Amino acid sequence: MRVDVFILCAALALAACGSGEPEAAKEELVSAPAETVEEEPEAPTLAGADVCGSQETYSGLKDMIFDEAVKRFEGDTVPLNDLRRAVNMRMEFPLVQGFNDQLQRTDCTGKLVIELPPGLAAAFDGERKLETDLTYSSQPAADGNGTILRADGTNYPVARLLQAATLVAAHKLARKGAGRSWWPPSIPVSTAADG
C-alpha cells in the first residue's frame, strides 16, 4: 500500500513540477499550435450589405447617371439638373457579389429604380419610373477622401434622360414664344431655366 501511495505522490510531484523536459521544449509545444492555426478572413456580408444598400451609394449612383447625361447632352442642361433634384432613386434587391480585401472594394448588383415626378410621364413615353439592372462597386479612394463608385448598366437610364431632355428642350422652345413655362409647376425650376 505504501508503494502505491509513493508512486501516486511521485506522479503528482512530476505533474506539478513538469515532466522533466527542458523549458525550451515546453515553450515550443505551447507556441506550436498558435502558429499552425490560420484565421479565416472575416466575411464582408454585413459591411458589404451596408455598402450595397446605403443611401450614400445610391446618391453617388444617381449623380453618376445624371453627370453622364449632362456631359452627353448637347443643349441646355437646366432641365436635366432640375430633374436630378426632382427624382427619387432607390435600389431593389441590392446584393453583395464579392469583396476584394486588398482594395476594400465591395462588388454589388441590384435593380436601380428612378421614380419620376408626376407630370413627366409624357417625356418618358408614359413611364412613371425607369428601371435597370446594375452591377456596381464601391471602394474607399486611395487618398482617403471619399468613395470611388463604378457601375455597369447605366446606359439605359442615361439614354432615357437624354431623350426626355431633348423633348423638354424642344417643348421649351415651342412654348417660349407664347410666354408660358415649359416645366410642370410641381417641380422646382432653376432661375436660369428661361434665360
Image (cartoon, helix red, strand yellow):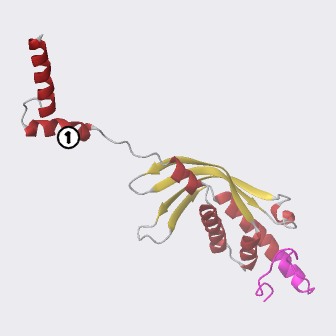
Q: Residue shown at 52%/59% (left/top)?
A: 138
Q: How many C-alpha atoms fall within 10 Å of the one at disc 1: few (<14), some, or many (≥20)?
A: few
Q: Is residue 14 above or below residue 68?
A: above
Q: Which residue range is magenta in the image?
A: 170-195
Please, is residue 108 above or below residue 58 in the view?
above
Residue located 81% across and 73% down the image:
168
Say whether residue 80 is left or right of residue 104. Answer: right
Residue positioned most to the front: 2
Image quadrant holding the C terminus, namely bottom right
Name the kind of residue labelled 1 in the image.
Ser
Where 73 sits versus 97, above or below? below
Residue 13 horizontal side relative to residue 180, left or right: left
**Residue sitting at 78 percent across and 58 percent down?**
129
Q: Residue 77 vs residue 182: left or right?
A: left
Q: Position of residue 135 (x, y in %)?
A: 58, 52
Which residue in the protein does label 1 denote? 31
194 sits to left or right of 37: right
Report which quarter residue 67 is drawn in: bottom right
Q: Is 180 in the magenta?
A: yes
- Which residue, as the protein is rendered here, is positioned at the far right? 178
Whether residue 111 appears in this view of the structure is: yes
Image quadrant in which you'd find residue 125: bottom right
Magenta segment, principal secondary structure? loop
Query: Which residue is at the front of the view, 40 or 9?
Result: 9
